[in-house]
């Protein structure tokens, strides 16, 4: 009986250890974002001037996948899909542009949404989440959560993330790991973009054309724990 109880205790403990290893200690995803895109300055652009998705240029699958450098970018990068002109699928709403939270759970939250074909890229708070066909990696996002949990020497450790972004009648659902539950939803309500987050919050966002001055460099994301 004692061995059985011990086994029952060991199973969840081992599961927690595995999840921690997978999230923080497993190999970081390879950085596949075009270096010129990361090096460029996306804070100078007019995000109300959106490209025509008329199929006359590059397709989504021809562009390298974008993902987060390290635990977060140091300045607002150029758009990942700037050269893409592939039309959106019928199930997708056009939510492209620069958005800022004005009401609800995350007032002041700012994000850039790119779309081209079946591909969607959300850039915000130091992270780049890119889902869809591309020339360098898989469909699902494969990057980091964006905040540093702890450091060892000069190395930073942050949570790995992976998700799919699936359109369902105008609603963009984020599925954890690509196959898990819906953790984030985005959809239009009139002229506003609604962002429902995993913490239960619901934020209304207005479209803006240019990046606010205080958003050009992400807020400092110092580690919660400095091990040594």
Image: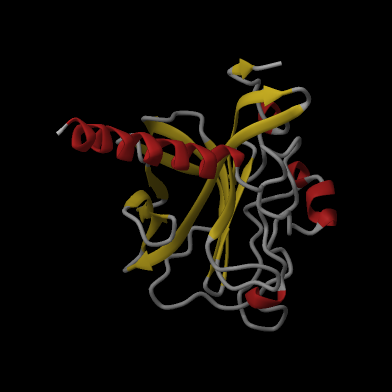
Q: Is residue 55 visible?
A: yes
Q: Nearer the viewer, residue 40 or 64?
A: 64
Q: Is residue 201 visible?
A: no
Q: Where does residue 63 sit, x and y in percent of width and height?
A: 71, 70
Q: Is residue 181 above or below residue 115?
A: above
Q: Quadrant of residue 169?
A: bottom left
| The residue positioned farthest toward the bottom in the image shown | 56
Q: Is residue 60 above or below residue 128?
A: below
Residue drawn at point x = 30 percent, y = 36 percent? 200
Residue drawn at point x = 79 percent, y = 49 percent? 38
Q: Nearer the viewer, residue 139 or 5?
A: 5
Residue drawn at point x = 70 percent, y = 59 percent? 80
Location of the N terminus by quadrant is: top left
Q: Nearer the viewer, residue 32 or 220?
A: 32
**Relative to residue 201, is residue 205 drawn left or right?**
right
Q: Where does residue 175 sit, x and y in percent of width and height?
A: 39, 56
Location of the C terminus by quadrant is: top right
């Amino acid at each position: 009986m004692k061995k059985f109880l011990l086994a029952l205790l060991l199973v969840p403990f081992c599961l927690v250890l595995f999840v921690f290893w997978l999230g923080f200690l497993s190999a970081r995803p390879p950085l596949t974002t075009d270096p010129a895109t990361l090096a460029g300055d996306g804070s100078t652009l007019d995000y109300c001037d959106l490209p025509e998705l008329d199929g006359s240029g590059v397709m989504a699958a021809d562009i390298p996948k974008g993902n987060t450098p390290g635990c977060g970018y140091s300045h607002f990068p150029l758009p990942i899909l700037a050269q893409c002109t592939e039309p959106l699928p019928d199930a997708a709403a056009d939510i492209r542009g620069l958005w800022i939270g004005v009401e609800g759970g995350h007032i002041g939250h700012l994000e850039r949404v790119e779309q081209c074909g079946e591909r969607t890229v959300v850039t915000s708070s130091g992270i780049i989440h890119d889902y869809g066909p591309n020339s360098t990696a898989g469909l699902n996002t494969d990057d980091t959560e964006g905040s540093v949990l702890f450091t060892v020497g000069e190395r930073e450790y942050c949570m790995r993330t992976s998700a799919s972004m699936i359109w369902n009648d105008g609603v963009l659902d984020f599925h954890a790991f690509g196959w898990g539950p819906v953790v984030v939803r985005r959809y239009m309500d009139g002229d506003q973009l609604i962002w429902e987050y995993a913490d239960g919050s619901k934020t209304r966002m207005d479209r803006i054309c240019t990046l606010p001055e205080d958003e050009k460099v992400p807020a400092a994301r110092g580690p919660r724990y400095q091990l040594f």
